[in-house]
Amino acid sequence: MTKQQPLRIALAGGGAFGAKHAAALRRIEGVELAAVVSSSLESSRRFATEQQVARAAADLDEVLAMDDVDAVILATPTPLHAAQTRACLAAGKHVQVEIPVAASLPDAEACVADAERTGLVAMAGHTRRFNPSHQWVHRRVRAGEFALQQLDVQTYFFRRSNLNALGQRRSWTDHLLWHHAAHTVDLFAYQTGAPIVRAHAIQGPIHPELGIAMDMSIQLRAATGAICTLSLSFNNNGPLGTFFRYIGDTGTYLARYDDLMTGEEEPIDVSGVDVSLDGIELQDREFVAAIREGREPNASLAQVLPCYRTLADLERQLAEPVGA
């Protein structure tokens, strides 16, 4: 592949996030969405029609056998992520996998090992690193203008039945720890620029049908001394999403997705932080740039692996009997 040729990317996953990636890729110059694959051939064809893509594949193996596909973006169910990431690398395809990379530490480590062995670009969809609001804070930290002392985060959904973001029934069950907490665990280490040295978690009752905890509380401490308090719930019947409060030595900032404000709710203009306000687009642009430049991307599998080590430690804590 020369620089003049389009970068041909296949997209696996015909759900809400697959559609976001498809829209983002259309805005990136020199990129061709070469093929799409979903849960069935019928679903793939429907998704291809919606996204105006010429080829719909029956399964990922069909995509990986295509000689004219350079890279794959995986926006598939969490239980498939690790095996599909490894399959992409084994087929010689650069890969970006949506968060989480895996639902266990051994699977995440295996993905990193495969990436290192092949030398291919392997990136995780840790979007918070790319959202302009969080980028704005990160740049102040790196410039020595802001030292994070506490990060307070609320991740709240109302999800008492097994439905996805589009209200459709899922064939798998989402998880507060391995999916939603992963965003904040990685972001906290990224924003402090230091490893997490202490982590503690407690959870509420297990849902009788879903088999998961619906409420969780996590505390983290970085080597800098900064702390993070993360509250997560699938029981919240109110404003949904994730809300961040950065408390530092020179200010307080509130981030709500792509909006940023001071602690007194004064808006901060982040329109000039990057070429887009869409975190998914910026994430995909980094993936494309890393492939073209032959370099490690921000949010490479190796960079985010410490997050999954912390999650595994928290999972061990949560598995201990109450009162142990």
Image: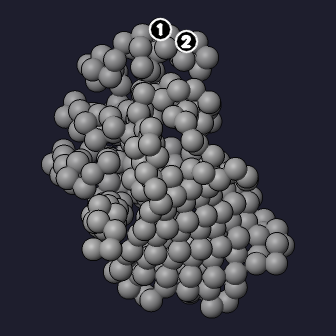
Q: Name the spot of residue 141 as percent of width and height, x first.
A: 56, 80
Of residues 200 and 267, the one nearer the viewer is 200
Q: Name the spot of residue 89 as percent of width and height, x first.
A: 24, 37
Residue under the image location 57 percent in, 41 percent down: 160
Is the N terminus in the top left, top right, bottom left or bottom right quadrant? top left
Residue under the image location 65 percent in, 63 percent down: 243
Please give the label number shown on residue 42: 1
Of residues 52 and 107, the one nearer the viewer is 107
Of residues 137 and 264, the one nearer the viewer is 264
* Distance from Cα at disc 2 to Cα at disc 1: 6 Å
Q: Amino acid at mark 2?
A: Arg
**Does any portion of residue 11 appear in the rendered image?**
no
Q: CB under 8 Å between callouts 2 and 1?
A: yes
Helix, strand or loop at disc 1? helix
Question: How would you rate the neighbour count of disc 2 (Cα within 10 Å): few for under 14, some for 14-19, many for 20 or more?
Answer: some
Residue under the image location 34 percent in, 63 percent down: 318
**Does any portion of residue 204 appear in the rendered image?**
yes
Instruction: Judge from the rendering whether residue 243 lies leftward or rightward of residue 8; answer left or right.
Output: right
Q: Name the spot of residue 319 as percent of width and height, x first.
A: 29, 61
Question: How would you rate the neighbour count of disc 1 (Cα within 10 Å): few for under 14, some for 14-19, many for 20 or more?
Answer: some
Residue under the image location 57 percent in, 50 percent down: 234
> Which coloring applies here?
one colour
Q: Amino acid at mark 1?
A: Glu
Please give the label number shown on residue 94: none
Please give the label number shown on residue 46: 2
Q: Name the spot of residue 96 as percent of width and height, x first.
A: 39, 42
